[in-house]
Amino acid sequence: MSRLTGEFVLRSGRTATEYFDKYQFEADPVLLDQLAEQMAVLIPEGTEVLAGLEMGGIAVVTALGRHAKLPCAFVRKEAKKYGTARLSEGAEVAGRRVLVVEDVVTSGGQVVISTGELRKLGAHVDHALCVIDRQEGGAQALADAGITLRALLTRADLS
């Protein structure tokens, strides 16, 4: 898919000998559409809004929203300081069952942070969905925050 080998520093700060270049599948409209179609069946029943995390989750959530016929919210790492000054744009999340969507999960740190922010906005979040789970503790970190991680693919699937 988009598995590279070498030495890479991940967003979590960890060093890895393999890297999943998410932009290779996010930039390919045919592959992205196929991934989204397969991910749609993993959406928990009762989900009302799909929330994609900046930046990689935005392409994935947009494609997924097409297949699931669900509205999307686009979640920044921090609220912008101009215009609407919102953390989350697009669909309203307050009072709704929201599924957080990410491309690759390693430590789960950004998903935990963003979920906390969405919960402060009144969203009901108890699941996250990703394309690839690197299986490096992210699922456990999310579980500790009350979030169940569902993944289309895992590191083991791609090795």
Image (tube, grey):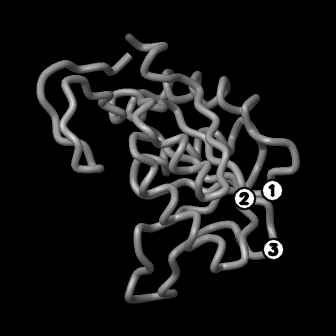
Decide if residue 76 is on the left or right side of residue 139.
left
What secondary structure is found at the residue carrying circle 1? loop
The outermost residue toward the right is 46
- Marking on residue 98: 2
Residue most toward the left? 7
Q: Residues within 10 Å of mark 3 (few under 14, many from 20)?
A: few
Query: Looking at the picture, does residue 147 appear above or below residue 87?
Result: above
Percent coordinates x, y for residue 53 in the rendering: 49, 56
How far across and down, in percent of the image, does residue 158 sit? 42, 14
Question: Which is nearer the N-term, disc 2 or disc 1?
Answer: 1
Image vertical order of residue 13 relative to residue 79, above or below: above
Q: Residue at x 40, y 34 (%)?
A: 136
* Alpha carbon distance from label 3 to label 1: 10 Å
For disc 1, the marked residue is 48
**Left or right placement of residue 62 versus residue 107 in this view:** right
- Measured along the vertical axis of the image, is residue 122 above or below residue 72? below
Name the residue tied to disc 3.
95
Q: Amino acid at mark 3?
A: Gly
Q: CA distance from mark 2 to mark 1?
A: 6 Å
Residue contact between numbered discs 2 and 1, judged by CB atoms under 8 Å: yes
Q: Is residue 116 left or right of residue 23?
A: right
Element type at mark 2: strand
Identified by mark 2, the residue type is: Val
Residue at 58% from the left image edge and 63% from the top image edge: 115
Of the pair 99 and 140, the residue shown nearer to us:
140
**Closer to the camera in the image, 17 or 87:** 17
The amino acid on which the numbered mark 1 sits, given as a three-letter code, is: Glu
Foreground mark, 3 or 1, reads 3
